[in-house]
Amino acid sequence: MDNLIVAPSTDPIKNVSEIIEYARSLQHCADFLHCDIMDGKFVENKTYTYKGLKEVNQRTTMPLDVHLMVESPSKCIKDYLLAGANILTIHFEAYKNKKLLVRDLKYIRKKKALAGLSIKPSTLVADILPYLCFVDVILVMSVEPGKSGQEFIEDIYKKIVELSKVKNDYKLDIKIEVDGGITPPISQKLKMFGADMVVSGSYVFNSDNKELAIDELR
Ligand code: DX5
Ligand code: ZN
């Protein structure tokens, strides 16, 4: 079984200069920096925007895994791509019009980034099946999006098993990424069930030895 890809998240940190410092301290051991972007509408909290992301991109070498928790992704995906997103993930629930969802996923790929689609804990795998062929990364939320430090929802294991079966049955070239409440024992189970990539907010951030924490998550 391959090692998991590990992406520490920016959510526990409140300003861009500290995010840059954090990213620099982890760039030798983490695979991606998971950039949580919130607009105060799709979720309650509000964070930095594409301007902050651009600065992070200019001042670190860390590949950027951008998780857009915003009400109208169509209005800003271009800005985040130009700012340097390597993976750009939009939320399934943010789109009433699924034609726009497909259009945006295709646009992300056209701009040579990986197209990510995220689902909240209550969204079913069956709901996203028609869109998986437009997706490179599926980001399964294992907490309600909006803040770090919440507890992992155990029901999510079933969703990973289900997604991993779909991926194998249809020979899809997608990565299964899981986000929220992840600790080393949880990440080991997720890996066994077919996850490829995990996000970590508080576990890595609160560890004294962050390199070791990342290693334990793999
Ligand atoms: C939640 C964010 C997560 C968060 C994870 O809204 O999408 O990326 O930072 O943090 P932990 O690992 O603490 O749940
Ligand atoms: Zn996230």
Image (cartoon, rainbow, N blue to C red):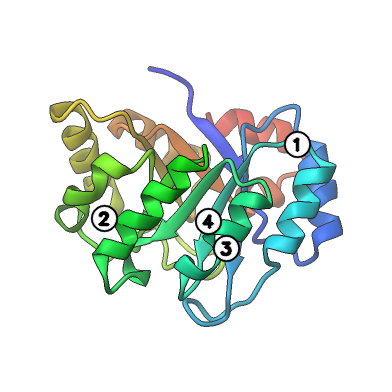
Residue highlighted by disc 3: 148
Q: Image height check: is 175 above or below 122? A: above
Badge 3 or badge 2: first in the primary sequence: 3
Residue 207 percent across, percent down from the top left: 71, 45
Chain-order first, disc 1 or disc 4:
1
Callout 3 touching callout 2 (CB < 8 Å) = no
Q: Identify the residue under disc 1.
A: 26
> If you read the primary sequence from the N terminus, does the residue marked by circle 2 or circle 4 appear first?
4
Q: Secondary structure at mark 4?
A: strand
Q: CA distance from mark 3 to mark 2?
A: 18 Å
Q: Is residue 150 visible?
A: yes
Q: Residue at x 71, y 36 (%)?
A: 62
Q: Which residue is mark 2?
A: 155
Name which of mark 3 and mark 4 comes first in the sequence.
Answer: 4
> What separation in Å lies between label 2 and label 4 (alpha carbons)?
22 Å
The local crowd at label 2, few if under 14, some if 14 to 19, many if 20 or more residues have their Cα within 10 Å, is few
Instruction: Specify which label sits upstream in the sequence, 3 or 1.
Output: 1
Instruction: For marks 3 and 4, give the one nearer the viewer.
Output: 4
Corner quadrant of residue 141: bottom left
The mark closer to the camera, 1 or 4, is 4
Q: Residue at x 33, y 69 (%)?
A: 93
Q: Is residue 163 left or right of residue 87?
A: left
Above-or-below relation of 112 to 55: above
Q: Which amino acid does the dot numbered 1 rest on?
A: Leu
Residue 141 visible, this orientation: no
What SS does tag 2 mark? loop
The answer to whether the residue bearing label 4 lies less than 8 angstroms from the nearest atom of ligand 2 is: yes
Q: CA distance from mark 1 to mark 4?
A: 19 Å
